[in-house]
Image: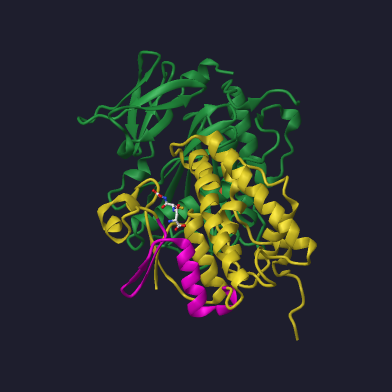
Chain colours: A yellow, B green
Amino acid sequence: MILYDYILSPSCYKVRLLASLLGVQLELRAVDFHPGREHKADDLLNLNPAGSIPILVDDDFVLTESAAMLAYLASKYGPDWAADGDPQAIALQHQWLAFSNRLTATLGGARLVEMLNFEGDLEALQSSGVVALRELEAALFARRVSGGTFLVGDAPSIADIACFPYVALAPDGSVSLDPYPSIRLWMRALRALPGFIEMPGIHRLHELAQDPLAEPDS
Amino acid sequence: MTTDAVRNAWYPVGLLSGLSVDGEDSLLLGEKITVFGSDDGTPRVESCGHILPVVQRFGHLWTSLGAPDKDLFTIPEADHPDRTLVDVGVVRVKCSPLRAVENFLDVAHFPFVHTDILGAETHPEVRDYKVEIRDEVDEVWATKVEFFQPQAAKSAGGGITTEYMYRVPAPTCSVLYKTCPPRPGEWDVIALFVQPLAEDLCDVWPWMALFDDESSMTDLIHFQQLIFLQDRSILENQIPKKLPLDPAMETPTRADLTSVAYRRWLKRHSYTYGAQLVAE
Ligand SMILES: N[C@H](CCC(=O)N[C@@H](CS)C(=O)NCC(=O)O)C(=O)O
Ligand SMILES: [Fe+2]
């Protein structure tokens, strides 16, 4: 499976992250998104007329939306990561996948303006990003009160992976995460998952790094 | 504060490959400028109806708000025809332009910020190295900087001890020379060109001249963007925001020696934009 990828793209990172959590190997094709704008050049437009990345290609099967890629990887390699059977859980997962597009448009837009000099109305992007973060905080707080850690059900799912990157990188667009304790706990839980990988701006949990001076298990 | 030294320095304002003939607005030292590409190879920069001086070098367009008293520096090593020249592209950072340069000069942050790439948490030590202000060229130089690196470059096969030389040839520019994994005896050249937009905001234009026949251009760009974006979140959280030039605020450790020399050199030139002169 080939992923058209950009190291700084949170949408691409979603797919890389889930693949890593599932232990699935992806063949990465680096796209010169910035400064080259390769995603807007003919070759990639032929593959994805929307002119965005990621693009996932599995033989002759092509996907151009990260949410669909998460669903595809989960149903193929990690059924526990996608809700199944329970109508409400399935619907909630869809709802969060759709919600993640709002995060991309708002927090992601602010990040591109602030970080890579893209055009956009920064204040409007930031304030609609904050509205989305408040909704997420309220939902995660409610989950916490009823003993849950993740967005849907008892285990992490594609809903969490879809929402996590743009939330974690909100500070890149000058949106602070300080006001959202439930979001911060949720991010910590995700960063602690076995197989978690980093991207610039999203660091591993240092506390969990192996202590170099520790005695080896014997 | 814009002293003469600040106004007369050269600054990068765009990639030659990315200029627009219609002009693009930007900022330099808090002043509005417009950068124009051209079809005949004569890009220009305007500020309040004035044409500013320009230089085209290292894949970037350079300008100055004042009257530069010397030519923009050169990097003779970068002229080697076998080198791949890499325009990494702009990254905006909410930090003092001088902080961006200072961070670039410091190897001690590698294990913690570029974990498992430029440094390993198990090898944090920085050995003795040499720092000097070279009066004849009026530049800061640090040499014989040795550091263990898990993945020193895209072209590195595994962990190696890398040797670095650092150079500050202009107040908001730094060039480093590092061991080139595929060509022992040669140096890879990596530069950070910083455009000060305001005292606490800059556009950073990383640029590289490497020996690497294997990696694609996109891979080289991404390697450097990955590294620089790891720095960005650190840079935006530094306190104090401006770079202190007051010797009373210096707390030199070995790793900091280059930074101390850089600050002294800035002070000697009264380069104060993005600097803090007294403790706040
Ligand atoms: N198609 C959506 C959006 C992905 C997205 O926003 N990708 C960015 C890079 S992170 C992009 O390619 N933007 C260029 C554009 O949309 O023109 C997804 O897969 O989630
Ligand atoms: Fe760094």
The image shows residue A35, relative to residue B194, as above or below, that is below
State the image coordinates of residue A188 (x, y, percent, origin top left). Answer: 70, 61
Residue B130 seen in the current view: no
Residue visible at 66% across and 41% down in the picture:
B237
How many labels, in total? 0
Magenta span contains residue A81: yes
On screen, B238 above or below A77?
Answer: above
Residue B75 place in picture, x, y as percent: 39, 39
Q: Residue furthest left?
A: B40
Q: Which quarter of the figure is the N terminus of chain B placed in?
A: top right
Residue A134 versus residue B196: which sits nearer the camera? A134
Q: Residue at x 52, y 62 (%)?
A: A14
- Lateral position of residue B257 relative to residue B181, left or right: right
Q: Nearer the viewer, residue B159 or A145?
A: A145
Residue located 55% across and 78% down the image: A78
Give the side of residue A21 with respect to residue B122, left or right.
left
Q: Is residue B197 shown above or below B109?
A: above
Task: For residue A125, say whether it is visible.
Answer: yes
Q: Position of residue B87 (x, y in %)?
A: 37, 45
Residue A191 in the image: state x and y as whole percent.
65, 63
* Quadrant of the drawing holding the C terminus of chain B: top right
Determine which quarter of the picture holds residue B242. Answer: top right
Q: Pick out the residue farthest to the bottom.
A: A218
Which residues lie in the magenta part? A53-82
Q: Is residue B47 left or right of residue A137?
A: left
